[in-house]
Image (cartoon, grey):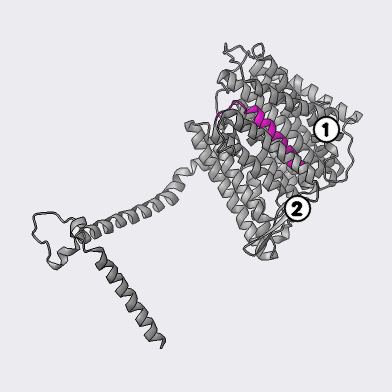
């Protein structure tokens, strides 16, 4: 509908209304609803609402509606269609009951989200969008290969937990999902593309791609020990590069990797508490990360500047944005009374209960980095740092409304965690507001603040680019181009040259067929096919004669 409706406001209303209607339908159907279909001999489950995917579907629809409010002022039909398609893809992946349906929506997500990068209409965004699309198509190919092998082994496409003894099928599926979950070293597409997407498109991107991949991990790979260590690596890797980054949205993008690392660890631990923690933290993360990207987008909308080294002194000019952004910063840092406090700690506690004490300490260390860069570095140097004398233009009111809605969600679930816990799929009791947890969080936050204040001069934004793992394959690009791309291009160029030569030869010899029989030879007038071609009846008679001859030959052979 958004593709054909006229008028910016009507399309914007559709972008808000469609996810809300979807949420109402989901809530009405409830857990247990499903729809089946047959296609080319395959039995498909187009959607199946379970306790696991219900919580993911709810937050995907909620954040899509609020992101539609944030983007209400945007008059770009392409962005609006892409955003709705992207949300539909994430919802389809989440509710899919078979691998084929999941794959189709997986690819829809890749194409639609890439458009939100292209829509920025800058040279660097176009390059990042192409790279983003190529990477996700490659990931989809890995997933597809794994699905084919899985079907060959089992004879079914029904989604089910995979085990390492399934061999290459399981590992290819894991590789495809790991790319979307931004597992280092497969992650550089994320901090490259998200800062270059449109201001409103980045809200959808921060919420949907990695969290839908987390859901797939939760369904297919629960209890895989490898994921415990992969997740811890992600948690620590993301915070290190977030501290090094200079672009405010790139800092937030790197921290997505860190926060998703907690969720991956929860999947790997595989207990009821850890998997509840993964679902709860995905829910919380979508809310506060969207709020943070909204705040960063408001800064860019008002100033046109995104580099931390070029920002500063904006607090008096953007008071509303400051307060709302800080709610997101408190939430992601795990402050009591905010939603990060009631979800992240579930995963940390589950690591301790499963006797993974080193993992628990590593996740607590990652929490320090979270408060350091997102809770302190971004707001301090953006809003209270050295005044760069930037002009802050007013931002649309709908952006404030959207930030206010998400900020309310961050606070509501932090104060009343039971509202989230009742949606969680597994039977595992957890109480976040214990004396031990409160003291632990207070100590982490206090000592991190002291460390930041002492080292604040060294933590300020610097106008450089931190090298990441993509440096290695960027360096290898010339060699790969010489070995793989140039020979292929040369082969097709030779084929095109041969084709053109044949076409030219045929044109020169068949341009005047009458000349073959000595007709019109030496004529001063050029051959005119419209004048000198045989009558239409002669051509039809010849074709009819050919068909009669063929029919007679067939009948003769048949007899």
Q: Quadrant of residue 25?
A: top right
Q: Is any atom of residue 222 visible in this view?
A: yes
Dot 1, crowdedness within 10 Å: few (<14), some or many (≥20)? Answer: many
Q: Name the secondary structure under disc 2.
A: strand
Query: Is 437 located above or below residue 231 in the figure?
Result: above
**Image position, residue 539 (x, y; %):** 27, 67
Q: Quadrant of residue 193?
A: top right
Q: Residue at x 14, y 54 (%)?
A: 526
From the viewer's side, name the closer residue of 8 and 373. 8
Residue at the extreme right of the image, as rendered: 435
Q: Nearer the viewer, mark 2 or mark 1?
A: 2
**Image position, residue 230 (x, y; %):** 70, 44
**Does 28 lie within the magenta span?**
no
| Residue bounds of the magenta highlight | 55-75
Q: Earlier in the sequence, mark 2 or mark 1?
A: 2
Q: Name the secondary structure under disc 1.
A: helix
From the viewer's side, name the closer residue of 359 and 139. 139
**Image position, residue 239 (x, y; %):** 68, 32
Q: Is residue 179 left or right of residue 48?
A: left
* Quadrant position of the N terminus in the picture: top right
- Give the residue at mark 2: 34
Query: Is 452 located above or below residue 350 in the figure?
Result: above
Q: Is any atom of residue 240 visible in this view?
A: no
Dot 2, crowdedness within 10 Å: few (<14), some or many (≥20)? Answer: some
**Does 66 lie within the magenta span?**
yes
- Give the residue at mark 1: 342
């Amino acid at each position: 509908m958004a593709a054909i409706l006229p008028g910016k406001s009507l399309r914007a209303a559709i972008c808000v209304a469609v996810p809300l209607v979807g949420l109402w339908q989901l809530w009405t159907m409830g857990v247990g609803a499903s729809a089946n279909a047959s296609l080319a001999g395959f039995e498909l489950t187009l959607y199946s609402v379970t306790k696991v995917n219900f919580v993911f579907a709810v937050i995907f629809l909620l954040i899509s509606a609020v992101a539609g409010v944030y983007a209400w002022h945007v008059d770009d039909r392409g962005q609006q269609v892409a955003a709705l398609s992207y949300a539909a893809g994430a919802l389809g992946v989440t509710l899919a009951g078979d691998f084929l349906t999941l794959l189709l929506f997986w690819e829809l997500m890749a194409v639609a989200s890439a458009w939100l990068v292209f829509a920025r209409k800058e040279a660097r965004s176009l390059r990042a969008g192409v790279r983003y699309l190529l990477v996700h198509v490659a990931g989809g190919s890995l997933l597809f290969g794994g699905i084919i092998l899985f079907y060959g082994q089992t004879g079914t496409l029904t989604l089910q937990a995979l085990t390492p003894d399934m061999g290459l099928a399981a590992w290819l599926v894991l590789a495809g999902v790991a790319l979307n979950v931004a597992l280092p070293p497969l992650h550089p597409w994320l901090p490259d593309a998200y800062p270059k997407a449109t201001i409103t498109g980045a809200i959808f991107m921060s919420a949907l791609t990695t969290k839908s991949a987390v859901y797939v991990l939760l369904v297919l790979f629960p209890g895989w020990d490898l994921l415990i260590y992969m997740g811890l690596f992600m948690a620590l890797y993301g915070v290190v590069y977030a501290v090094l980054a200079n672009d405010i949205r790139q800092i937030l993008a790197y921290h997505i990797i860190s926060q998703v690392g907690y969720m991956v660890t929860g999947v790997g631990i595989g207990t009821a508490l850890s998997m509840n923690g993964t679902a709860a933290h995905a829910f919380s993360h979508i809310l506060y990360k969207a709020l943070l990207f909204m705040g960063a987008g408001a800064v860019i909308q008002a100033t046109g500047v995104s580099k931390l080294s070029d920002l500063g002194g904006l607090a008096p000019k953007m008071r509303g944005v400051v307060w709302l952004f800080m709610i997101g910063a408190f939430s992601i840092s795990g402050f009591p009374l905010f939603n990060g406090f009631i979800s992240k700690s579930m995963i940390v506690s589950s690591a301790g209960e499963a006797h993974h004490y080193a993992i628990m300490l590593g996740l607590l260390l990652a929490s320090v980095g979270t408060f350091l860069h997102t809770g302190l570095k971004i707001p301090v140097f953006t809003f209270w740092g050295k005044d760069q004398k930037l002009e802050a233009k007013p931002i649309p009111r709908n952006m404030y409304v959207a930030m206010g809605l998400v900020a309310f969600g961050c606070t509501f679930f932090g104060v009343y965690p039971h509202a989230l816990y009742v949606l969680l799929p597994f039977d595992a009791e957890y109480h976040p507001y214990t004396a031990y947890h409160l003291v632990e969080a207070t100590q982490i936050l206090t000592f991190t603040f002291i460390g930041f204040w002492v080292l604040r001069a060294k933590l300020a934004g610097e106008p450089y680019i931190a090298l990441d793992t993509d440096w290695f394959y960027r360096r290898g690009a010339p060699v790969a181009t010489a070995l793989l791309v140039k020979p292929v291009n040369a082969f097709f160029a030779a084929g095109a040259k041969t084709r053109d030569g044949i076409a030219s030869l045929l044109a020169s010899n068949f341009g005047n067929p009458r000349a073959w029989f000595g007709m019109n030879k030496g004529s001063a007038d050029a051959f005119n096919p419209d004048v000198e071609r045989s009558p239409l009846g002669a051509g039809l008679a010849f074709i009819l004669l050919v068909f009669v001859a063929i029919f007679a030959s067939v009948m003769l052979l048949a007899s």
